[in-house]
Amino acid sequence: MTRRSRSLVRLGLVTVLAVAGCGGAGPWHHAARDISATTGTTSPAPTPTPASTSMPTGAETAFAEPRQYVSKNGLLKVRLVVGARTVRLAGQPVRALTYNGDYMPPTLRLRPGDRLDLTMVNDLPERTNLHTHGWHVSPMDSSDNIYLYIRPGQSYHYTYRLPADLAPGTYWYHSHAHPRSEPQVFAGLSGAIVIDGLERHLPSGLRHITQHLIALKDFQVRDGAIPTSGIDSNAPTTRTVNGLVNPAIPIRPGETQLWRLANIGADIAYNVHLEGGRFHVIAQDANPVDTVWSADTLLMPPGSRFDVLVQGPAAGRSRLSTLAYTTGPDGDSYPRATLATVVSSGPATPRAALPVKFARFRDLRHDRPAQRRTIVFSENNPQKKFYIDGKLFDHQRIDVRARLNTTEEWTVRNTANEEHTFHIHVNDFQLMSVNGRPYAAHGLQDTVQLPVRGQVVIRMRFRDFLGKYPYHCHILNHEDNGMMANVEVVR
């Protein structure tokens, strides 16, 4: 079945199921606002670590991180050129969509309170735009405004002012060019963002440990290129870490490292397992937790992230894998696959005592909801249509009006025979219950998996920013085919 008929990847409840031991190259919708002028000038930020897009075949390849653009004195100025390029993936030349020529593009690295000035140049023959996934910033004007498009051959200058209290952790950026989000992201248009500051919550002895970005993307090849139409999320696909096939991640026996796990692909889920080890979660979806929790397997639907501490096993090799996973009777089935090989070698170091208590978060259980709403995700699989409250997406329609500085409680129901991935922009939420069972959240999140024919209850507080922004299924085939709606925050 094609992804459209199989309804694309849905992963089990981000934290809920993180338990221990869709395609088409159809015409653009022209109702959204186009950008026709280039404003401002930018220059590339420093790039201390060259990206590697050449991946020789074989059991292992060297681990490498994307190059980084790093803020300085509170400012990061970046120029991103969007274009089609031939890159090397799994040792073969593949035509892909790239930012600055890379399938795994530069990581943007900033601190809370910084400003990002980003000029995007569109060298594609179709429109595109940019979404800074998870950022608590304005959804209007030249900030995280997914309703504007950059036409072919044109440029646009984005300006983001990060709040001083923006949560540290791992975010990502990607195309949100409805209805072409899926093909553009699947072909390569996604990269990582790191907001520094998690270290201040760690014990002093762990504040300078090695950090690794482990960004998960998958690709398929058809006629020498990653397909941008007729994408089948249930077909065999090559999983990569930072664009690399089975890289070898070095660690010393007993050493503590901070890994930034991020699913930055278009559609599929990862059921991430560390052989012989455990993930000690310190942040979810770039929200530091109040209490560190651990698991040997983390279920990661599209868009989700976990910042985790890991400790080196005894000398030898072990696998970082994604385990077999099925998203429901009408969904996809993914086989087990090796993501990377963990190579433990060198002098052993005593295992550090890991923190138990970590950060603070505002527990919304104590808020009195100003509104209680029911949101329904449904689908017509034969017609390849996906709905929220029985409606296909219309960028002009306001589906929910919420008042600034109020808390709302939403019951999000899924009537389909496959999982869907709920995501909302700007304001993260607290998971309250799953299928009627109370959920003890350790922090906020911005993605959650909706169980097959089940429901979750979430609470969110609409803070700081007025304006319109979407909530949608983060299986991008579903989003492109209607499963998106708009909330407007008003005074």
Image (cartoon, rainbow, N blue to C red):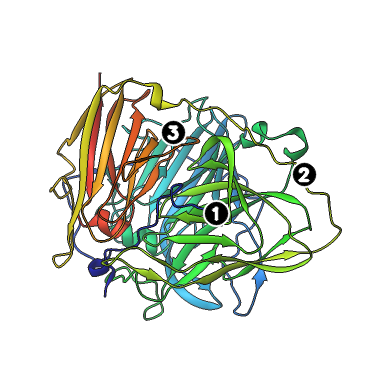
Q: Nearer the viewer, mark 1 or mark 2?
A: 1
Please give the residue where the numbered disc 2 appears in the rendered image.
352
Q: Quadrant of the C terminus?
A: top left
Compared to 291, does 215 lie above or below?
A: below
Residue 318 picture quarter: bottom right
How far from the left and from the top, in percent, is residue 341? 65, 68
Separation of residues labelled 3 and 1 (CA atoms): 38 Å
**First of labels 3, 2 by sequence position:** 3
Frontmost of labels 3 and 2 is 2
**Residue 369 at x, y = what percent?**
29, 23
Q: Which residue is under mark 3?
A: 160
Q: Secondary structure at mark 1?
A: loop
Is residue 3 visible in the rendered image? The answer is yes
Residue 35, image quadrant: top left
Amino acid carrying label 3: it is: Tyr
* Residue 354 numbered mark, or none: none
Residue 20 circle label: 1
Q: Residue at x 14, y 38 (%)?
A: 397
Question: Considering depth in this image, is 68 or 245 the residue closer to the camera?
Answer: 245
Q: Left or right: 385 with respect to 8? A: left
- Crowding around mark 3 (Cα neighbors within 10 Å: few <14, some 14 to 19, many 20+) is some
Residue 24 at least partly seen: no
Q: Residue at x 16, y 45 (%)?
A: 389
Q: Residue at x 26, y 63 (%)?
A: 7
User: Mark 2, residues whose alpha carbon is within 10 Å: few (<14), some, or many (≥20)?
Assistant: few
The residues tagged by marks 1 and 2 sit, at their Cα atoms, a distance apart of 21 Å
Q: Residues within 10 Å of mark 1 (few under 14, many from 20)?
A: few
